């Protein structure tokens, strides 16, 4: 199975290191890259798409749609400020293959763990209260079902993508997408795959501001989620 | 500027490390590398030496002495590391802060995703945010550090034992005996880990057993209980 890696960038800040890691560790994966022309002009990719700064959801929808329209049956969505390890892509796709054999429900997101992400997906969290085995928690070698995760380096099928796409948001675009897919019967999983994520290189760290930006759309378009997440 | 030193036996992850140095380390920082093949960077001055060493300890010692011919200190970096945009600058800031307090320093090392002891970000304290624990904002004194990304200086340097596993444990032990203090910096880096010695940790331990038994029976007792 070959799934192209789809990346959208605004500044291209960490992208050179990320692309170097793809070249070293999974050169077989085609790279689809979207961003402003003056940024993407500096990088090599199998497909370059010019696109100005909009929001995470719209930007990624455009580049993912393009990869699916080229005939791929699945894609790997990747943030532009991550770095792959030698096994990131391999383990992610191996886990997808294993899940396809084992579970009946359609697969939603299968996403990698990392060092900058929400709880459980973040390797710092220790949900089963385990002792470190040398350098890692033992559960990091397991695939875990999740209600919601961030596709920092995440696999998705055309079946799931054709059911729902990202909403036009920065923060909460992944939350809304995960909930929408779950409501449609898809199940998400945390893979054994690991990537390094610098984090907050594009939209910053001001959580209050980023939540305020997303809230009006969610209140208007997903009032049930708004009730759960914002008590409104 | 404080130079960087890298030892690489197989160069497996070296291109990604070098790309992060190219992007995130000031251009006037010199880079010393021992590896099988000649390495270069587009903007940094690179001093290359052919890697002919059996163990990580021996290669690290060679590089340290080579760099100390022209510099008083350097930042050692394992070849399977990737720097963040601020890893180098935060590490050097922390070293300068500690030096300004008159502390006799052994080594100062960064935090990471793959290490033992308090350098491992899984062992943080306080509230856990998406980008880290509260304690990751602090410089912390410790009695053990792996030199994965670490600052060291000529005036307090102690040669590593010519083994792979435990060479850093022994060095830390000697630093403390010499009243040199060890600190975990706020600097963060990504460490792929186990790319040279592999993930058969029992074998890694075993490979150092004979040398420790013959040369450091005190430490052999500590690690092998023999």
Image (spheres, rainbow, N blue to C red):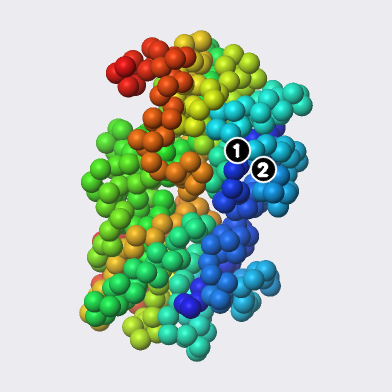
Q: Quadrant of residue A88?
A: top right
**In-image side of B12 versus A46 (left or right):** left
| Residue at the disc numbered 1 | A53
Alpha carbon separation for disc pair 1 and 2: 7 Å
**In-image side of A96 versus B193 (left or right):** right
Q: Are marks 1 and 2 on the same chain?
A: yes
**Residue B132 placement (x, y as % from top left):** 35, 46
**In-image side of A146 versus A54 (left or right):** left
Secondary structure beneath disc 1?
loop
Compare residues A135 and A182 and report the one nearer the observer.
A182
| Residue at the disc numbered 2 | A36
Q: Quadrant of the N terminus of chain A?
A: top right
Compare residues B47 and A174 and report the one nearer the observer.
A174
**Residue B10 placement (x, y as % from top left):** 61, 63
Name the chain letter of the residue that bears numbered label 2. A
**Residue A190 placement (x, y as % from top left):** 46, 30
Q: Residue at x 34, y 60 (%)?
A: B186
Q: Residue at x 58, y 20 (%)?
A: A165
Secondary structure beneath disc 2?
loop
Q: Residue at x 38, y 50 (%)?
A: A135
**Residue A123 placement (x, y as % from top left):** 39, 41
Tell me: residue A132, above or below residue A210.
below
Can residue B216 be seen at all in this image of the molecule? no
Name the chain letter of the residue that bears numbered label 1. A
10 Å neighbourhood of mark 1: few (<14), some, or many (≥20)? some
Tell me: residue B201, above or below residue A146.
below
Compare residues B4 and B167 and report the one nearer the observer.
B4
Q: Are marks 1 and 2 in contact (CB under 8 Å)?
A: yes
Can residue B117 be seen at all in this image of the molecule? yes
């Amino acid at each position: 199975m070959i799934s192209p890696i789809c990346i959208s960038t605004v500044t291209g800040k960490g992208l050179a290191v990320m692309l170097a890691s793809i070249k070293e560790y999974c050169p077989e994966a085609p790279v689809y890259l979207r961003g402003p022309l003056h940024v993407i002009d500096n990088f090599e990719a199998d497909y370059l798409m010019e696109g100005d700064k909009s929001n995470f959801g719209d930007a990624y929808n455009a580049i993912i749609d393009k990869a699916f329209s080229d005939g791929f049956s699945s894609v790997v969505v990747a943030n532009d400020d991550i770095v792959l390890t030698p096994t990131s892509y391999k383990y992610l796709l191996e886990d997808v293959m294993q899940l396809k054999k084992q579970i009946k429900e359609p697969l939603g997101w299968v996403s990698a763990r990392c060092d900058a992400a929400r709880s459980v997906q973040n390797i710092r969290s220790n949900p089963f209260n385990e002792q470190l085995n040398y350098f890692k928690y033992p559960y990091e070698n397991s695939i875990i079902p999740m209600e919601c995760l961030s596709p920092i380096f995440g696999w998705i099928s055309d079946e799931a993508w054709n059911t729902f796409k990202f909403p036009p948001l920065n923060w909460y675009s992944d939350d809304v997408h995960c909930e929408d897919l779950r409501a449609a019967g898809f199940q998400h999983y945390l893979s054994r795959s690991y990537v390094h994520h610098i984090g907050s290189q594009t939209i910053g760290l001001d959580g209050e501001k980023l939540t305020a930006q997303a809230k009006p759309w969610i209140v208007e378009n997903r009032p049930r989620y708004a009730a759960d997440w914002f008590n409104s | 500027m404080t130079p960087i030193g890298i030892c690489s036996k197989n160069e497996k992850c070296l291109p990604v490390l070098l790309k992060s140095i190219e992007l995130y380390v000031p251009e006037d920082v010199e880079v010393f590398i021992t590896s099988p093949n000649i390495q270069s960077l587009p903007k940094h001055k690179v001093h290359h030496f052919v890697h002919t060493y059996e163990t990580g300890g021996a290669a690290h010692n060679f590089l340290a002495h080579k760099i100390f011919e022209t510099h008083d200190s350097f930042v050692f970096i394992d070849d399977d590391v990737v720097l963040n945009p601020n890893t180098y600058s935060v590490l050097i800031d922390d070293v300068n802060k500690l030096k300004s307090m008159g502390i006799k320093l052994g080594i100062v090392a960064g935090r990471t995703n793959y290490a033992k002891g308090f350098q491992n970000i899984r062992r943080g304290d306080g509230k856990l945010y998406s980008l880290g624990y509260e304690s990751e904002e602090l410089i912390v004194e410790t009695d053990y550090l792996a030199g994965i990304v670490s600052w060291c200086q000529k005036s307090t340097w102690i040669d590593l034992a010519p083994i792979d596993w435990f060479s850093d444990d022994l060095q830390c032990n000697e630093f403390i005996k010499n009243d040199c203090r060890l600190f975990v910096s706020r600097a963060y880096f990504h460490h792929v880990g186990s790319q040279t010695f592999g993930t058969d940790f029992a074998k890694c331990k075993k490979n150092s057993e004979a040398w420790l038994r013959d040369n450091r029976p005190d430490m052999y007792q500590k690690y092998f209980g023999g």
